[in-house]
Amino acid sequence: MGQGTLGVGALADVPPEPITVAPPLSAADHRWLAELWCAEWGGLVMATRGVAHRLEAADALIARRGGVYAGAAAFLTDPGDGGCELLSLNAVAPGLGAGTALLSAVEAAARDRGCRRVWLVTGNDNVDALRFYQRRGYRLVAVHPGAIDAARRLKSTIPLVGQHGIPLHDEVELAKGL
Ligand SMILES: CC(C)(COP(=O)(O)OP(=O)(O)OC[C@H]1O[C@@H](n2cnc3c(N)ncnc32)[C@H](O)[C@@H]1OP(=O)(O)O)[C@@H](O)C(=O)NCCC(=O)NCCS
C-alpha cells in the first residue's frame, strides 16, 4: 500500500515544470482523488488511532506538474485543539517534489485556520515516509503497538505484510509544531 505508482507514465511524459498545489475543483478532480485513494490506500476510509475517517469528507489538496496530476493530500483541522491531522499524502511519482509541496501547503492551510501543530500516523513498515517527514521537521511523538492490527478489523484491505516485507502491526505518530 502507498507505493505512489498511479499514473507514473503520464507524469513522466510531462516536461519539468514547477509543482502547483490547489484544492480539487472539478468533478474530474474528485474522481481522480477517489481513484488515487482506492489504488493507494485500499479504499476511501483511513483508520488512524482507532478512528475511521472518510477521505472524501476531509479537506484535500492536489499537486499538478505541467497540468498533470502529481499527488494529493487529505487533512482534517481542529482549531479547537489546535491540531491538524494529515490523513494521507501521496506522490504519483516519487522524488519530483510533489510530496514536499503538498506538505508545505497543508501546513500553511493549518496555520491559516489557527492550528498550532500538524500530526500524522504512518505504518511501522513505511521507512521512506519516516525519513521524508523527519527531514521536514517532524518528530516521532508516539508508537502505538498493535494499532494497525486493530485498524485491520475496521478495514480488511490493510495488508498483513507491508513495504520491504516488514510485518505491519504498529502506528508511528509524528508531529510538527507550526
Ligand atoms: C512519501 C511521499 C509522499 C514523498 O513524496 P515525494 O513527492 O516523493 O517527495 P519529494 O520528491 O518532495 O522528496 C522526496 C525525497 O526523496 C528523494 N528522492 C529522490 N528520488 C527519489 C525516488 N526515486 N524515490 C523516492 N525518493 C526520492 C528526494 O530527493 C527527497 O529527498 P530529501 O528528503 O532528502 O529532500 C511519496 O514518496 C509517497 O507517495 N509515498 C507513498 C505514500 C506514503 O507512504 N505516504 C506517506 C504516509 S501518509
Image: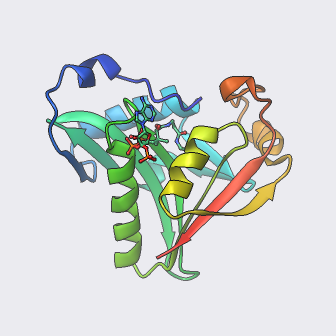
173 vs 108: above or below: above
> Which colouring convention does the figure follow?
rainbow
Which residue appears at 77% of the width and 37% of the height? 152
> Quick check: 49 left or right of 31?
right
Residue furthest right in the image: 146
Find residue 59 and report its horizontal and vertical position in percent. Answer: 40, 57
Which residue appears at 17% of the width and 44% of the height? 18
153 vs 103: above or below: above
Is residue 56 in view from this perspective? yes
> Quick check: 153 left or right of 140?
right
> Quick check: 143 left or right of 37?
right
Q: Quadrant of residue 108?
A: bottom left
Find residue 150 and report its horizontal and vertical position in percent. Answer: 82, 44
Residue 139 vs residue 64, the one in the foreground: 139
97 vs 137: above or below: above
Residue furthest top in the image: 9
Ligand 1 is in which quadrant of the figure? Answer: top left
Find residue 35 and report its horizontal and vertical position in percent. Answer: 41, 29
Which residue appears at 57% of the width and 39% of the height? 128
> Quick check: 68 left or right of 48?
left
Residue 81 vs residue 15, the one in the foreground: 15
Find residue 91 and report its horizontal and vertical position in percent. Answer: 40, 37
Which residue appears at 37% of the width and 31% of the height? 92
How many numbered marks have been drawn onto this rendered protein structure?
0
Is residue 87 in view from this perspective? no
Name the image quarter holding the N terminus: top right
